[in-house]
Image (spheres, grey):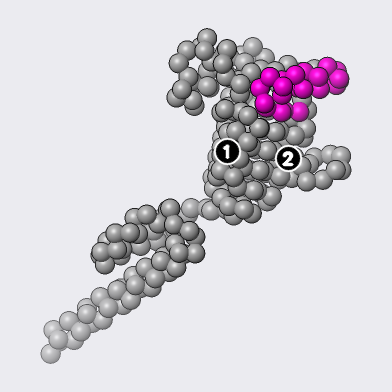
Amino acid sequence: MFETIKEDIQVVFERDPAARSALETVLACPGLHAMLCHRINHWLWTKQLFLPARLGSHIARFLTGVEIHPGARIGRRFFIDHGMGVVIGETAEIGNDCSIYHGVTLGGTTWQKGKRHPTLEDGVIIGAGAKVLGPITLGKGSRVGSNAVVVKDVPAGATVVGIPGRVIVKKQTEDIREARREAMAKKIGFLAYGQGNDMPDPIENAINSMLDHMHKVDEEMQQLKRQLKDEEGRD
């Protein structure tokens, strides 16, 4: 356990640029305090000392603003930034190297006993205010945008945004398509396209469709020019 606690302290320096010293981190980092308390409370829970474990988690909630049920299983190097308003349910499972921000809820959607909270695989990051609900799995290295509401499984490496959360999986073909769109936008002088990431989805989708169509037309025109040039050469 002591090695795990040492990693919990070290990870604050790796992921929080505001951390200046070990003493400051130990004394004034509520996310770290919540995790240190949870390590102890979870140990009590595994020893079937349920009441002391629940009392310990209740005290930790009062002190840090972070509510972690002692039954939750959390891996190594878990980082809670700011912490206030974080809720992690009893059957939640969190892998190694995960990070969550303030206002995140890993909650359940049923009153039935058994597995009812999310599972986070290694390297998951959840943005501020996001809600991940039900016995779903967030794949390794996935990302959840701020204030998203996730109720379905998320593939490894994917990003989830919006309410309800929609999965965005960037594939190689999509990267190529985006490069073509950018090239076409520059060709026609549409400088505003460079801000596409900040535009509402309907507008962005419409512009992407237009650029895809223009790229296709441009390719066909170039092909026709080559055919005409070949015909002239034969004459």
Q: Which residues are magenta?
A: 48-69
Q: Earlier in the sequence, mark 2 or mark 1?
A: 2
**Residue 1 position within the rendered picture, expressed as x and y whole percent measured from the top left:** 67, 14
Judge by depth and name the residue closer to the eye, 71 or 25: 25
Q: Residue at x 41, y 66 (%)?
A: 207
| Figure quadrant of the C terminus | bottom left
Helix, strand or loop status at disc 2 = strand
User: How far across and how far down the image is residue 46, in percent?
Assistant: 81, 21
Magenta span: predominant SS is helix
Mark 2 vs mark 1: in front: 1
Q: Is residue 151 above or below residue 206?
A: above
Which residue is denoted by mark 1 in the rendering?
128
Residue at the farthest top position = 23
The answer to whether residue 141 is left or right of residue 35 is left
Residue 178: quadrant of the picture:
bottom left
Q: In the displayed structure, does residue 229 sit left or right of residue 129?
A: left
Determine which of the numbered discs, if any, sits on residue 107 in the image: 2
Label 1: element kind = loop
